[in-house]
Amino acid sequence: MMSMRTTRLPVIIALSATLAVTACAGDPNRRAKIGGGIGTAVGGVVGSMLGDKSGTNTAIGMAVGALAGAGVGHYMDRQKAELSQKLAEQQAANQLSITELGNNTLQVGVASDASFPVDSASLTPNAQNTFNSIANVLKDYDKTAIHVVGFTDSTGSSEHNLQLSQARSQAVAQFLESRGVNSQRVLTWGRGETEFVASNDTEAGRAQNRRVAIIIKPIVEGQEQQAFTAPPSLGNPQFNP
């Protein structure tokens, strides 16, 4: 089970869009987003507020700007290099990692134990410094979609772990936005006690599973919706039978 939200709508252009938001307001799992391929209107990009399950958002991608296909690799390489430079201290302390997932997608994996007190979604002062450094890079590379994904270990109930992972991903997203990252680019996902990267049989393994991942996808011209689809499984198949 997982949960997703887009943090805000990019534009409020027509009464129909407003009404659609209102209609969704009572749904605790609603997904506020502009559906791709629904149409164009004032300013060129409007969709309809549909609860499709694909997580796509072509209109937001078009609103914030897109990359020409030929320049995507170089753009993402420069972004990775800058993240590595700004976060060298945290990487040296094994508090986070920066990896490539393929398809020009980056992952910044941050240990929850280095970010939150036990069973809490409040960012520690050290974590705020880390995410501030991340935000300073992300806001400069604005032609990307940012997926914040929360995970827990297997301790506790699955319902509690799902809620905690959601709360932590939202806390990180809100912090990034407060530091200047365009909220139109940010989506959050809570995946609870799924997609483990280590064994839950040891404390060291459980600590690795308690994490937040920031997935950075390029918004490519003509393929905008792909940047806003759900991130793939981020677990190790060895620990996810």
Image (cartoon, grey):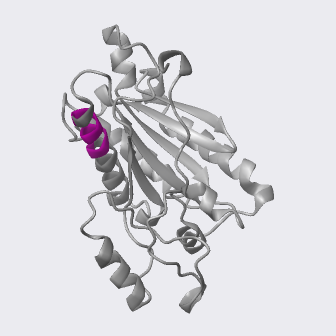
Image position of 45 with respect to 77: above or below = below
Q: Position of residue 113 (x, y in %)?
A: 29, 26
Q: Main secondary structure of the magenta part?
A: helix
Q: Is residue 175 left or right of residue 157?
A: right
User: Could you tell me which residue is drawn at 32 percent across and 59 percent down?
Assistant: 178
Between 175 and 229, the one nearer to me in the picture: 229
User: Could you tell me which residue is drawn at 56 percent across and 40 percent down?
Assistant: 232
Between 38 and 81, the one nearer to me in the picture: 38
Between 239 and 211, the one nearer to me in the picture: 239
Q: Quadrant of the N terminus?
A: top left
Q: Position of residue 41 (x, y in %)?
A: 56, 90
Image position of 81 with respect to 147: above or below = above
Q: Position of residue 47 (x, y in %)?
A: 52, 78
Rendering quarter of residue 238: top right
The stretch of residues the image draws in magenta is 160-167
Q: Is residue 10 left or right of residue 27?
A: right
Q: Residue furthest right?
A: 70
Decide whether residue 116 is among the magenta residues: no
User: Could you tell me which residue is drawn at 46 percent across and 33 percent down?
Assistant: 109
User: Could you tell me which residue is drawn at 47 percent across and 21 percent down?
Assistant: 197
Image position of 110 with respect to 153: above or below = below
Rendering quarter of residue 16: bottom left
Q: How many numbered discs, if any?
A: 0
Q: Position of residue 136 (x, y in %)?
A: 45, 52
Image position of 174 with respect to 27: above or below = above
